[in-house]
Amino acid sequence: MSSVTTRTLLEMKEKGERIVALTCYDALFARLLDASGLDILLVGDSLNQVLAGAPSTLSATLDQMIYHTKMVRRGTERAMVVCDMPFLSYQVSPEDALRNCGRAMKETGCHAVKIEGGQPMAATVRRLVDIGIPVMGHLGLTPQSVHALGGYRVQGRDDAEAGRLKADATALQDAGAFAVVLELVPAPLASQITKALAIPTIGIGAGPACDGQVLVLHDMLGLNDQFSAKFVTGGPLPGPGAFFREVILNWGAPSRGRPTRWVSQTTKNSRS
Ligand code: KIV
């Protein structure tokens, strides 16, 4: 089984094969997702919201990202594992970025890092790539800038913004990034950027024309009781959240002296 590398992703784009990515935060899901043939497991700083319950990704720390990326790497054999670099771990200076991204690579065994931002980050991307750290870019709605952007809103709607995003994407490619995430970008703009770049684009809420798609795993599974992403194709899978609530109620009912309300076939079979 050959593992997914930056070269594999480039070849996939050239052959028109779609790249499939999901976020992953632990070894158990890493094993399940890796066995299902996913190409990229992104240890997103979204874990700060999804797992840690914070209001944004801004308070995620490098130690937190390293802890989760190590777990994901342990559960992965084939997929590329990408560590999302948290706010202020790469923006202060290129030297600081080298130290922190290098630490993520050394301590977790991940295959690449992801950083947010376009032209202002190009020099940093170049420095990272030059010392052998593969970098995935992230443009459009960049969650670490949520306050500057005025909320979680679609980016690149007007001509000026669209032009800037195109220039940002080209700058990241020229600096040596191996792929770019496009988040909450109008589908026609994402399509234009995808056609203009030689490196793959990975879309999230950016329409179907990107070379790949990424979602937050918990959104895709319908496991987030506080958030439902509009762009999850066909809506979140029906019911795992509700299913778990039902199973837990069912399990707890006898201990409270209440009759069992419901026993699913799955639960029955797994115990017999
Ligand atoms: O943190 C994250 O999960 C991400 C993806 C949504 C692209 O950056």
Image: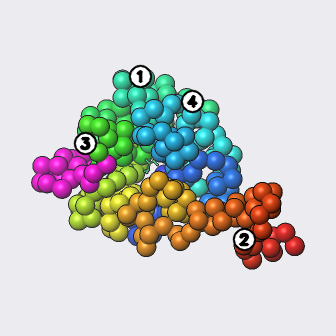
Residue at disc 2, secondary structure: loop
Residue closest to the eye, 90 or 16: 90
The CA span between labels 3 and 2 is 46 Å
The Cα–Cα distance between marks 3 and 4, rounded to whole angstroms, is: 28 Å
Q: Residue furthest right?
A: 272
**Up/down of 191 relative to 28, above or below:** below
Q: Which residues are magenta?
A: 152-175
Disc 1 is placed on an element classified as helix
Of callouts 1 and 2, which one flags the residue occurring earlier in the amino acid sequence? 1
Q: Nearer the viewer, mark 3 or mark 4?
A: 3
The residue labelled by disc 2 is 261
Task: Out of 33 and 262, give the one closest to the viewer.
Answer: 262
Question: In this orientation, does residue 85 appear?
Answer: no
- Against 73, residue 258 (above or below) is below
Task: Decide: few, some or many residues near mark 2? Use Cα within 10 Å; few <14, some 14-19, many ≥20.
Answer: few
Q: Is residue 48 left or right of residue 243?
A: left
Select label 3 or label 2 by which is in front. 2
Q: Residue furthest front?
A: 257
Image quadrant containing the C terminus:
bottom right
Amino acid identity at mark 3: Gly
Q: Position of residue 175 (x, y in %)?
A: 33, 40
**Percent position (x, y) of residue 68?**
60, 40
The mark found on residue 63 in the picture is 4
Q: How is the image coloured?
A: rainbow
